[in-house]
Image: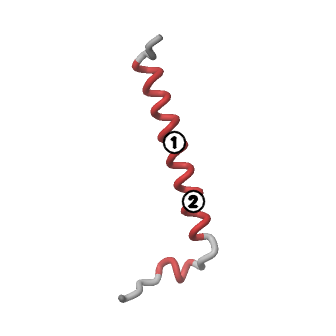
Amino acid sequence: MTETPVAADEVLRKRALEALTTARDRTRLLTECVDDGELTAQHSP
């Protein structure tokens, strides 16, 4: 059985939301241990 365009859009939308949520969670894990000053400081190479 073939999905309707609306159903396919919903599946795609759900997958995109899951991927963005996972990326946001990873970013929080990486940045929560660093204080705001360090996160916003600019460093010259």
| Residue under numbered circle 1 | 17
Between marks 1 and 2, how big is the CA–CA gap? 14 Å
Query: Which of marks 2 and 1 precedes in the sequence?
Result: 1
Q: Residue at x 47, y 78 (%)?
A: 40
Q: Position of residue 32 (x, y in %)?
A: 62, 70
Tell me which colouring the rendered structure shows.
secondary structure
Q: Position of residue 19 (x, y in %)?
A: 51, 46
| Residue under numbered circle 2 | 26
Viewer-side label of 1, 2: 2
Residue 18 picture quarter: top right
Residue occupying the far top of the picture: 1
Does 33 sit left or right of 38 as displayed?
right
Q: Residue at x 43, y 20 (%)?
A: 6
Badge 1 element? helix
Amino acid type at circle 2 is Arg
Does 17 sit above or below residue 7? below
Q: Position of residue 7 (x, y in %)?
A: 47, 21
Amino acid type at circle 1 is Leu
Characterize the local packing of mark 1: few (<14), some (14-19) or many (20 or more) Cα atoms within 10 angstroms.
few
User: Closest to the observer: 3 or 37?
Assistant: 3
Does 31 sit above or below residue 14? below
**How many labels, in total?**
2
Q: Residue at x 57, y 68 (%)?
A: 30
Does 12 sit left or right of 31 as displayed?
left
